[in-house]
Image (cartoon, rainbow, N blue to C red):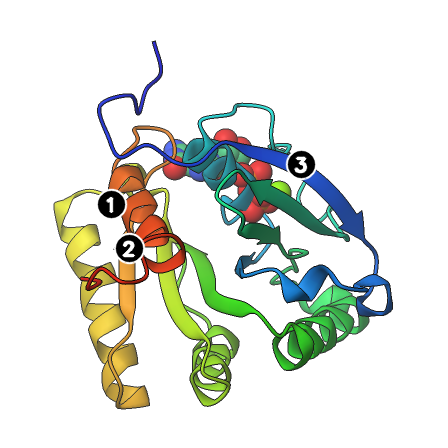
Amino acid sequence: MHKYSKEIPFPETKFFTSIANLNEKEELDSIPSVAFMGRSNSGKSSLLNALSNHKGLAKVSRTPGKTKLINIFKTKEGFNLIDLPGFGYSKASHKEHKDMMKLLEGFLNTWTKLKILFILCDSQREFPEEELSTIEVAMEKKIKPVVIRTKIDKLNQSEQHRVRTEMESAMNEIGIPFRVFYISSTTGRGIGELREFIVENMVNQTKVSK
Ligand SMILES: Nc1nc2c(ncn2[C@@H]2O[C@H](COP(=O)(O)OP(=O)(O)O)[C@@H](O)[C@H]2O)c(=O)[nH]1
Ligand SMILES: [Mg+2]
């Protein structure tokens, strides 16, 4: 039995290709896409596996920072899921960090059919300033920014309240509301809701989204 079988189904998803930089994108960006960004260890691979109900779709790693490629997954509904390379928190990898931010900026500037940018952040961490500016950049480019606070199963009630308050402050700082999901790939919490959101935005575009 699948853990998410009672929730909203998600289109069948398969690994399509990986590219090392944006020069290799060719026509790939002409396909409607949603992208996932987040620091190493933020739970990106686990989320992609949970969404697609496919345990080995994206590799779940205990050694962070290994994925340096843009991984592209194709859904049966005709839109793509894009797994952007993770980057660290550590100042030690300053050059690497800058390169990753550059790649991300280039991605947002050139990926023509990017509809949604999911910004993942481990709920046990503070939401970083850089991610906050990424939300604004996405808004300017008419890409829908959506925050996903991951690993919510690791927090008690008061800690969960703190994360929600943190996101309210972030919205006040930006001055425009954005959607936030609180999820756990381990327990399945929020996964159905997130699937529904993606399907509404990428498949049933005539339906009014929540
Ligand atoms: N408790 C808990 N652990 C999680 C969750 N999602 C991911 N993890 C763990 O966090 C670590 C990093 O996850 P991974 O998906 O590889 O993160 P990525 O580096 O962003 O792709 C792994 O040890 C996962 O098992 C979650 O929802 N709850
Ligand atoms: Mg990963």
Q: Are marks 1 and 2 in contact (CB under 8 Å)?
A: yes
In the rendered image of this protein, does residue 191 appear above or below residue 68? Answer: above
Furthest-front residue in this view: 206
Would you call the spot at circle 3 few (<14 residues within 10 Å), some (14-19), or many (20 or more)?
some
Sequence-wise, the earlier of marks 3 and 2 is: 3
SS at badge 3: strand
Q: Quadrant where the N terminus lies?
A: top left
Report whether 50 appears left or right of 168: right
In the rendered image of this protein, does residue 81 appear above or below residue 168? Answer: above
Mark 1 or 2: in front is 1
Q: CA distance from mark 3 to mark 2?
A: 25 Å
SS at badge 1: helix
Report whether 149 appears left or right of 48: left
Residue at screen point 25% across, 70% down: 166
Mark 3 or 2: in front is 3
In the rendered image of this protein, does residue 164 appear above or below residue 57? Answer: below
Choose between 80 and 93: the one closer to the eye: 80
User: Please, what is the three-letter code of the amino acid marked with disc 1?
Assistant: Glu
Residue of label 2: 181
In the rendering, which numbered label is found on residue 193? 1
Q: Are marks 3 and 2 in contact (CB under 8 Å)?
A: no
Q: Is residue 123 visible?
A: no
Residue at screen point 48% across, 80% down: 138
Q: CA distance from mark 1 to mark 2?
A: 8 Å
Residue of label 3: 15
**In the image, the residue with mark 3 has its CB under 8 Å from the nearest atom of ligand 2:** no
